[in-house]
Image (spheres, rainbow, N blue to C red):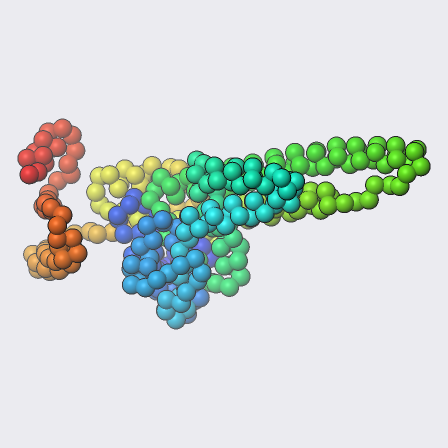
Amino acid sequence: MLLELARGRRILFFGGKGGVGKTTVSAATALAMANEGRKVLLVSTDPAHNLGHLFDRAIGSRPVKLSSGLDGLELDPEETVKKHLEEVSSALYRLMPMELRGEVDKHMELSRDAPGMQEAALLEKIAEVVEEGLKDYDLIVFDTAPSGHTARLMALPEMMSAWTEGLIKRREKADKFAAVVAGMGRESDRDLGGKYFEEDAEAQKESRIRQILLRRRNRFLNLRNALTDRDKTAFVIVLAAERLPVLETIELAAQLKRTGVTIGGLVVNKRMPAGVSEFMDERKAQEEKHLKVLAEALPDIPRQDLLLVAHDVVGREALEVFATRLE
């Protein structure tokens, strides 16, 4: 199912609850497509950036070669916000008098941690990756952050498009009003025998604002159109066969459907195989190997191991039983 889905799309998003293996599944899919001869870009939008850990190499904000036909990229929210604010600051510097630059800097510093700033900046970066990536790659695979963050991100293009469109319309009204006032000034100047006002830096400033707003609007519109194009884009939800991931998957699916995103499939990861005796022995040995590394790296921190239980821990009674395992 998964490879067939990838062969028929240009963009794949992988999402789901944290810890279910989204990075592994998305990376394996990207690698499989690259091995089939397609040129693939694998993009992580998760601030945790497990992609670099998975490939055991540094992956940053510029595409790096991971294998033949496969490039990797990690979108850093902090870096994305920084670049976004630098661009906005640059535009405001052109608009404001020199003596007000300190106020611009103060406003930008406050905006850095404003609610939604990271999501908005990250969304514009995703839009840019889609816009440019589709020119150079046959397939773009996104490894996204846990469900709640991703659901909000998928809904943002519609909101940001409408918000930016509103700014453009208000900007156009302001420009028309400014043109009328300027025209009246020219008539007055002519009556007094003076020279016509020359078009100065103000017109260039207004033009720059419109350019930024139009570019943002077009990017958000293109991303929204790409996300809702079922022939181009699909969303794959990765989950584990456990109560909370299943419930979260149902909720995420409903949210994605409301935003018009096509759900291409479900991947249930970490299923228990048949004939578990040998498997469990191998798994136990693997655990001991990793815990040895943990103990060597953090020898002074106390550790308690909790054994896997056969049933979901749901309700007070089950929690009471589980609590007896704690030391």
| Image quadrant where one finds the N terminus | bottom left
x and y, in percent, of residue 170 in the image: 65, 34
Whether residue 266 is visible: no
Residue furthest to the top in view is: 316
x and y, in percent, of residue 260 in the image: 46, 41
x and y, in percent, of residue 246 in the image: 26, 41
> Is 322 displayed left or right of 157 in the figure?
left
The residue positioned 39% from the left and 43% from the top of the image is: 150
> Is 270 displayed left or right of 5 in the figure?
left
The residue positioned 76% from the left and 45% from the top of the image is: 200
Q: Is residue 274 above or below residue 150?
A: below
Q: Nearer the viewer, residue 54 or 228?
A: 54
Q: Nearer the viewer, residue 112 or 13?
A: 112
Residue furthest to the front in view is: 99
The residue positioned 32% from the left and 64% from the top of the image is: 57
Q: Nearer the viewer, residue 322 or 233?
A: 322
> Is 280 displayed left or right of 32 in the figure?
left
Q: Is residue 251 above or below residue 139?
A: above
| Image quadrant where one finds the C terminus | top left
Q: Is residue 317 above or below residue 87?
A: above
The residue positioned 8% from the left and 58% from the top of the image is: 281
Whether residue 248 is visible: yes
Number of disc labels:
0
x and y, in percent, of residue 181 in the image: 79, 32
Q: Quadrant of residue 178?
A: top right
